[in-house]
Image (cartoon, rainbow, N blue to C red):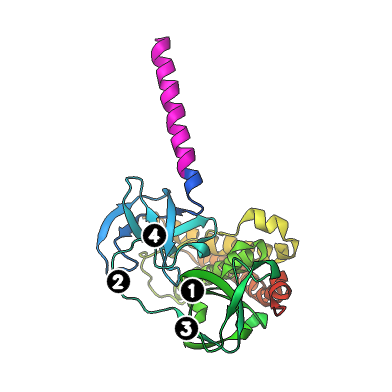
Amino acid sequence: MKRWLLVMLILVGLMAGTRAQDSDQYDVWVTTQDFSSLRRGPGTGFDRIMVVDPSVTLPAIGRSSDTRWIQVINDDGTVGWIASILLVWSGEVVNLPVDGVNPEPFVRRAGAIGVTSRETPYYLDEIAPEKLVGMIPEGTTVELVGRLGDASFGFWQFQIKYQGGLYWIGSWNIRIEGGNYLRLLDTQYLYPYGRLIQQYEENIALALGSYDQIRSIWQRLDNGDSVRCDPIPQTINRTLTEGDVAREDSFLPAVIALDDAIRNTNQAINSFSAICADTNRFLVQADIDEALVLLDEAERSLLLAASLLNPLRIRNPLINAISGRQ
């Protein structure tokens, strides 16, 4: 018995060691948030290899130029692509090879194309004097594959493909000739403040969508109209990272307003859902009045939350950090 126990412990140790070695091999990992199609290429036009279950963590080895698709290695060793909207990740996705590793042949349209307007310094990883690689001649056409910031920053940074590598240049040194740079991955997500701005904006949009739907339902009921119980608007789950919120005190009033809006909207949705589920219950005016009060409170909180977005965006410390010309 002791011998078998010893053998099992050794096997477990070997498996753990193998997993640790695998983890050390990759810098970026992704986790599926839903059932996710693993495809042979970066797009729905490619064959589906299999469906990956939710909450599966896989190593990422490549990305599409606009980062809408991530190339991964499945647990069985199969290499394929998953839509990034279905994933959360750890590590610097922006540094993954554009177009992936040994991909199946495909034709794609570049996310954005730019031409250097002057002799342009280019940098590895970030724009910093110690990261300078060299100079790109004036009039050189390059593909833009990532960004840090946008026009609201005044000056911002682009990640480019140049001579087979990924580098960074300043927006002030390039003229965009085609495509929409806003579709490129914004690497603000790498920084707590920038990550909060992106998540906060997304959460407001989600809250507003559910609020509009449930508000319409209760207003129609108040007008005496009949309303179907299917579909019921989705309740909202706030996705702001608690650790980031704790580090950035300036977000607290905005998050409180957002939470109030979400809580009241969800209560109105749950009230409608409960009435639909109980076939022995009749809707009365008191139910409608209570829901409309909740939605009035949700509207006030949403307006406050939305009004705080732009001031928070302006206060982003990255604006000053990356706007200095190099």
Corner quadrant of residue 227: bottom left
Question: Tag on residue 161?
Answer: 1
> Disc 4 and disc 2: Cα gap in Å?
14 Å
Question: What amino acid is labelled 3 in the image?
Answer: Ile
Residue 212, placed above or below residue 54: below
**In the image, which is nearer the foreground, mark 1 or mark 4?**
1
Classify 10 Å Cα crowding around label 4: few (below 14), some (14-19), many (20 and above).
Answer: many
Task: Give the mark, 4 or 2, whose residue is nearer the N terminus.
Answer: 4
Tell me the residue at 47%/73% (across/down).
163
15 in the magenta segment: yes
Question: What amino acid is labelled 4 in the image?
Answer: Gln
Corner quadrant of residue 158: bottom right
Question: Tag on residue 71?
Answer: 4
In terms of depth relative to the viewer, which is nearer, 97 or 270? 97
In terms of depth relative to the viewer, which is nearer, 11 or 318? 11
Question: Tag on residue 106?
Answer: 2
**In the image, which is nearer the foreground, mark 3 or mark 1?**
1
Tell me the residue at 60%/88% (across/down).
118
